Structure formats: C-alpha cells, structure tokens
Image (cartoon, rainbow, N blue to C red):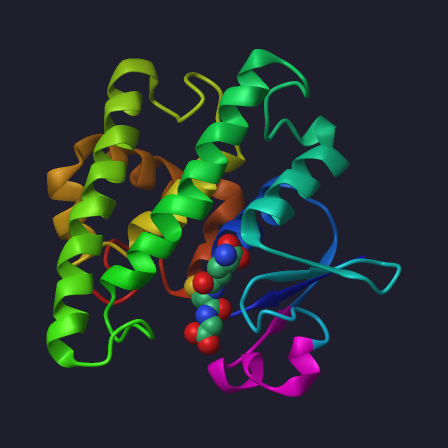
Amino acid sequence: MYKLYNVKAWGSLSIHLLLEELGVPYTNIWMTADQVREPEYLQINPLGMIPALGLADGRSLYESAAIVSFLVAAHPDGGMSPAFGSNDYGEFMSLLHLMSTELYPTISLASGNSAYAETSAQDAHIVATATALADRYWQLLDDRLAKHGPWLMGKEFSALDFYCFMLSIWGKPSEAALHQRFPRIAKLAAAVRARPKLKAALESHGVVDLGGYGG
Ligand SMILES: N[C@@H](CCC(=O)N[C@@H](CS)C(=O)NCC(=O)O)C(=O)O
C-alpha cells in the first residue's frame, strides 16, 4: 500500500486528488511544516519537501511530476493519462513538466522570502519578476484551454488537471484574482472542485471553496 506524505494545501494536494480519483489504497500521513524539516523525513525525501510517496517495498518517491508519472503508469486502467507512447502522451508529459519545472518554482519565488535575496529590495525584484513570468505561463495554459479545453488534454480529463488546479489555488495576490485574469483556469478549477470523488480530499485540505488556501 502507498503512503502519502501530505501537508494541507501543499504540493501533495495533486497527488492526494490523483490517488482518490484512481481509487487505489493508500495511507495518508498528515505532516506539519516542522516535521517536513526533521531528519526522519529526509530519509523519505532527501530534499525535505512535500510530496513524497512511500512504496510497499519501503522505498519512496519524490518530485511531484515523477510521482504523477509513476502513478498514471502503475494504474493505466485509471485513465488518468493518454496511452503511453502516443503523441498525446508526449504532449501530456510536456505540460506536466512545464507546470512542475517552470510554473511551480516560479510561483514559489513569487511568494517572496526567497533564499536568493539578501535584501528586501532584492526580494521585491524577485517577486515582481517571478509574478510576471508566472503570468506568462498561466496565459499559455489558459490559451491552450481556450483552444483545446475544457481540460488540458482536451475532452479527456487527466492527472494534469489536478496539477493545474493545485497550482491555481496558490494564485497571487489571490486565487480569485488569478481566476479573473485567466477565466479558463477558473473554469477548470471549478470543474475539478465539482468532481464527486474528490469531495472528502478537498475538504481535508480546506480548499473546497475558492480562496480556501488563503486568498
Ligand atoms: N520540485 C518539488 C517542489 C516541491 C515543493 O516546493 N514543496 C514545498 C511545498 S509546496 C515544500 O515542501 N517546501 C518545504 C518547506 O517549505 O519547508 C516537487 O515538484 O515536488
């Protein structure tokens, strides 16, 4: 059975929703921010970050996009990705990695208190630059939804939509403001929230309603 190392409304949210949608058994382990930084957790994720997924043989996986890629491959009947090796799958991977390696860290930088800044002026510069770059990526995703929606893979709902939803709840200055700028992202987020299988998980993260994350 899997073990999900989970913090409310952190990067484990997309994995939590994916596990629920797939209907596979897992043990949910709620963590505090302090526990994530403790040496015991570094044995599970050496990066000291959420998410991590414990496997039945005692190993653990980290990096959210890797966990998504693993789960959709381990449970292909769950229908959470296009067929492996298809051109659609290639596109699925491009979008997953765009969101995990570009948009996710850019959103983190846009949140401020960057380790890269020595002064508050430097931090303000990083926040402004990262906010503008994040908006560029959001526009790209919104444009794709406008052309090929309602989901990121067109008519097929997939694990990408959970991932996109998770990033959108961290919208700056608020989720609602992000929705105003990117209406198709707003539509996608509302449609994810409306999926019956996800109700309990969304409630447990406090993100059933718009702005549940804190804005
Ligand atoms: N590249 C990582 C990024 C994960 C990440 O940034 N997680 C944040 C939470 S959303 C975290 O655990 N931060 C550690 C901390 O704040 O102590 C991934 O995709 O899994």
Which residue is at 16% across, 48% downward? 132
Q: Magenta residues?
A: 29-42
Residue at the right extreme? 57
| x, y percent for residue 143 | 24, 24
| x, y percent for residue 91 | 49, 21
Quarter of the image where one finds residue 93: top right
Give the camera-side residue of 118 and 102. 118
| x, y percent for residue 123 | 18, 72
**Residue 58 is a magenta residue:** no
Where 136 falls versus 59 (above or below)? above
- Relative placement, left or right, of 181 versus 33 is left
Where 209 falls versus 144 (above or below)? below
Which residue is at 50% across, 50% downward? 14
Which residue is at 81% across, 62% downward? 59
Is residue 18 visible from the viewing direction of this image? yes
Is residue 208 visible from the viewing direction of this image? no
- Relative placement, left or right, of 66 versus 101 is right
